[in-house]
Amino acid sequence: MASHGLSRRQEFDGSATGRTRWRVFTLVLVVGVFGVGLMLTGMSQGAIAASFAVSGTRYKASADDLRAKGVVQYGSVDRSSSEKAHPVLVNGFRDARLSNFCQSIVVPGVPGVGDMTIRISAPGGMRAENLVIGVEKVTGDLTLNNVEIGRDAATFGKGPEGLQGKPGTFGIQADSAHIANLRQVAWSTTASTLRLSDVRITAEAGRHECF
């Protein structure tokens, strides 16, 4: 497996450094952020659930910079309470740090208000441990270190404890990742711990999304 991973890295970047770069990527190995139900509370330490019933509302998030360790990714499906399926990439990070973090959720058709935006800003940054997210779309500049592309997701060992896909599922794992100018749309997130610096949470009429 080690020699196979090295040849894949050489194929992508022409070197044996174990570093792979893509610019303006979509649906590739990104960190999510917490949904409305996880705004202020993390989950208990230990293995993190890879899926749960989602509200059916997407949310947007942005950050100037993300640095993460212990990175995994594989395809899956999030389901809303009405059993509607949402194709996602499950992304797991043992430890992730984001600078100038923003998250926004639009709640449509609130009586007497119309559309309402719940917005969370943390100019001082956010740190997440054992982060697992269901991502729909993301853009930014990505660097992966010591990456394995095409690994069986059932054999992951670098991400959050116990986070693996079904046998035979195409997966990616890496020692670490760096994303600049993160812009993301996601359906779900769980984490063992979330810490936000200089946090501000607002609810305003209209649409005031992060991007």
Image (cartoon, rainbow, N blue to C red):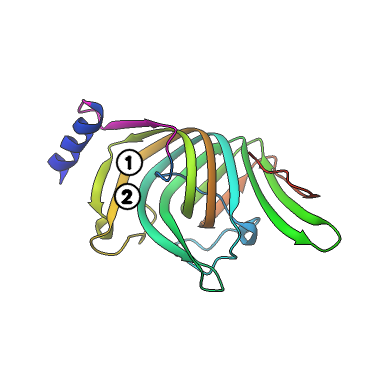
Q: Nearer the viewer, residue 55 or 132?
A: 55
Q: Nearer the viewer, residue 138 or 146?
A: 138
* Residue 95 falls left or right of residue 185: left
* Residue 208 falls left or right of residue 27: right
* Residue 75 falls left or right of residue 52: left
- Look at the image and say whether residue 73 sits in the magenta stretch: no
Please provide percent x and percent y for residue 77: 43, 63
* Residue 35 falls left or right of residue 116: left
Q: Disc 2 residue type?
A: Lys
Q: Which residues are magenta?
A: 14-25
Please provide percent x and percent y for residue 201: 73, 48
Q: Quadrant of residue 42?
A: bottom right
Instruction: Specify the label residue 175 is tagged with.
Output: 1
Q: Quadrant of residue 100?
A: top right
Please provide percent x and percent y for residue 189: 52, 57
Give the mark nearest the N terminus, 2 or 1.
Answer: 2
Please provide percent x and percent y for residue 167: 24, 64
Q: Quadrant of the C terminus?
A: top right
For disc 2, the marked residue is: 158
For the point 65% across and 55% down, the residue is 39
Badge 1 marks a residue whose secondary structure is strand
Q: Residue furthest right?
A: 112
Q: Disc 1 residue type?
A: Asp
Q: Quadrant of residue 109?
A: bottom right
- Look at the image and say whether residue 17 sits in the magenta stretch: yes
- Asked if disc 2 and disc 1 are in contact, CB closer than 8 Å, the reply is yes
For the point 71% across and 57% down, the residue is 107
Q: Residue furthest left?
A: 3
Q: Residue furthest bottom?
A: 82
Q: CA distance from mark 2 to mark 1?
A: 7 Å
